[in-house]
């Protein structure tokens, strides 16, 4: 299959994918309704909205979103609406679940429910951000910028596995993985560098398959061939990283936010490790980011039936 | 005094400051000689170069830097050249010391030498990056993106003190300080958030003076009033941060690099906590960044005689 290289590619293939149904929890929110309205208009998916019916109607009217094509289920309680939306997907009547105006913790609890949830035994659930920047000829992925505060070595290994799985579905045959640190040298005093080298070794030994891992490596060496050559850092990933693995949630959050606020890049996001795609956007994401994220989930869902 | 709001302001005041002398260690490097050549031409300072005399002459000839106005001291060994450059400053015959092509560890050891070094008893030495971005009407400072891998609470307090001291010299009367985390809520499981709140409380109790501290706070809430308002985060620092305090070196490094590589902002840097300013640039810094950093040190030196 073709490799997706830009958000435009993504929107295009998602529009041409089989039409899927998205179950939206706690949909009574202006941002959520605006983004599902835009996604419906763009022909990306159908939506079932769970939430406070009266509030959904009020908000939709205020922002001129036409609800005629939406199925709406009146579940005023946010936690209950999360459970109901997840259950619709695990029951097979919808393909994708979307977080609405519900606390992340409550939404994740519904995702992880042993009976009605979407967890795969033995998997972890991790977040992946996707960015398109004019300096690079490819999409750049970041994991995990949102779910797991301070992953240990075993968890980082699973986080990489989750992301590589998603990236392969997007046509990136052998993702180049950069385990980010503050420098490219191993220092016993800095645990992130020790674990990064260990991940590179595990990859070399075949224990992290289907990708090429470099670590420790700093951001400039991961994305700039010029910097890598200047610092005489030689590795197949040097300057060519597809995936950045961050050591902590603070690094992922700051990287994502600085690219969003100061580099003004187009972004999207996805949740990996679940049986069906999950649309998980933040209040601070732009409407465009929310639309990219819906497209990504729709595209990933096409592989899963 | 006037507040410096841009790198242009900085270059202007540095050019008009009393002319200072910079002692450069391990100067036999193309980047170093190019930047001191440019600083000399810009009228920023005089330079004494320590290093391998023959190599310095060869490199200068190759890149057309005229050495006529430079004093050069032949010290081929990098560690010895660091000691000699620091000693020239601690002895009062130069005002500022500059790291050249010498390992950071060796250079810092010379800085910290109890007899000939530039350390102030009880102080820590920390790095401060300065950035100018078109979205903001002010310079944005980041600390510590380079020296201290994982500062504890007491060290973070001193890091803030160092930065506030520098910023006051640059005319920022009461710096607004954002202690960066991945979110604005305190979570017992995430130590960065617990310490960030503690720093805010220490500031409220007067134990971190001459500034206003907010924490925990995410990057978007620190720099974007729109984001802060969207997330209903209310604090004098919201959207108005002058200084970002990072929890670990990885966060600082990634933030600095992402702004440099993807947002293309003008940057500079400074080392705080020493008796005299220190010019400490990285190989990956651009010639422009090196020039800004020299200007910053020259400007800060003007206050110290």
Image (cartoon, coloured by chain):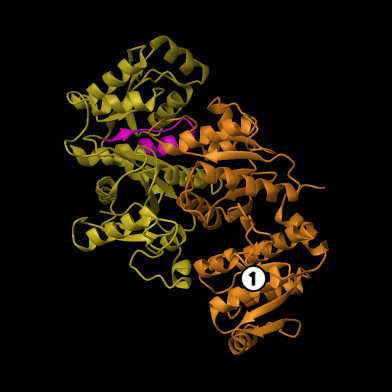
Chain colours: A orange, B yellow
Is A76 covered by the magenta stretch? no
Residue A121 location, x and y as percent?
A: 62, 55
Left or right of B226 in this view: A70? right
Residue B153 location, x and y as percent?
A: 28, 49
Q: Quadrant of residue A160?
A: top right
Residue A75 location, x and y as percent?
A: 60, 84
Q: Is residue B172 above or below residue B26?
A: below
Q: Is residue A143 above or below residue B85?
A: below
* Quadrant containing the C terminus of chain A in the rendered view: bottom right
Q: Which span of residues is magenta-colored? A: B277-294
Left or right of B47 in this view: B116? left
Q: Is residue A215 above or below residue B207?
A: above
**SS category of the residue bearing label 1:** helix
Residue at 18% across, 60% down? B206
Residue at 64% across, 80% down? A50
Is B286 covered by the magenta stretch? yes
Q: Quadrant of residue A68?
A: bottom right
Q: Chain of mark 1?
A: A
Residue B265 location, x and y as percent?
A: 49, 47
* Along the line of sight, the residue nearer the viewer: A251 or A301: A301
The answer, for residue A107, to whether it is visible in the render is yes
Left or right of A21 in this view: B204? left
Residue at 22% across, 30% down? B118
* Along the line of sight, the residue nearer the viewer: A106 or B41: A106
Query: Which residue does the numbered mark 1 point to in the structure image?
Result: A86
Residue at 22% across, 27% down? B117
* Along the line of sight, the residue nearer the viewer: B210 or A173: A173
How many C-alpha atoms fall within 10 Å of the one at disc 1: few (<14), some, or many (≥20)?
many
The answer, for residue B261, to whether it is visible in the render is no
């Amino acid at each position: 299959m073709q490799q997706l290289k830009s958000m435009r590619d993504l929107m295009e293939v998602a529009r041409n994918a089989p039409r899927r149904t998205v179950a939206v929890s706690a949909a009574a929110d202006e941002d959520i309704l605006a983004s599902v309205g835009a996604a419906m208009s763009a022909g990306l998916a159908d939506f079932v909205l769970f939430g406070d019916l009266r509030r959904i109607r009020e908000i939709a009217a205020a922002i001129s979103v036409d609800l005629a094509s939406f199925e709406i289920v009146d579940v005023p309680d946010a936690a209950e609406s999360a459970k109901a939306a997840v259950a619709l997907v695990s029951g097979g009547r919808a393909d994708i679940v979307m977080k609405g105006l519900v606390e992340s913790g409550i939404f994740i609890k519904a995702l992880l429910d042993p009976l009605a949830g979407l967890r795969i035994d033995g998997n972890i659930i991790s977040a992946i951000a996707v960015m398109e920047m004019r300096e690079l000829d490819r999409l750049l992925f970041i994991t995990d910028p949102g779910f797991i505060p301070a992953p240990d070595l075993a968890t980082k290994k699973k986080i990489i596995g989750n992301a590589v799985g998603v990236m392969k579905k997007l046509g990136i045959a052998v993702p180049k993985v950069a385990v980010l640190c503050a420098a490219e040298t191993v220092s016993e005093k800095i645990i992130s560098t020790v674990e990064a080298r260990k991940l590179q070794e595990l990859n070399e030994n075949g224990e992290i398959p289907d990708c090429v891992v470099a670590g420790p490596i700093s951001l400039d060496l991961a994305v700039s061939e010029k910097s890598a050559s200047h610092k005489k850092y030689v590795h197949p990933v040097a300057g060519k990283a597809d995936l950045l693995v961050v050591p902590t949630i603070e690094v992922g959050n700051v990287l994502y936010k600085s690219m969003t606020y100061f580099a003004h890049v187009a972004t999207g996001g996805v949740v990996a490790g679940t049986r069906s795609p999950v649309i998980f956007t933040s209040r601070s994401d732009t409407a465009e980011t929310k639309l990219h994220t819906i497209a990504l989930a729709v595209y990933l869902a096409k592989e899963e039936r």
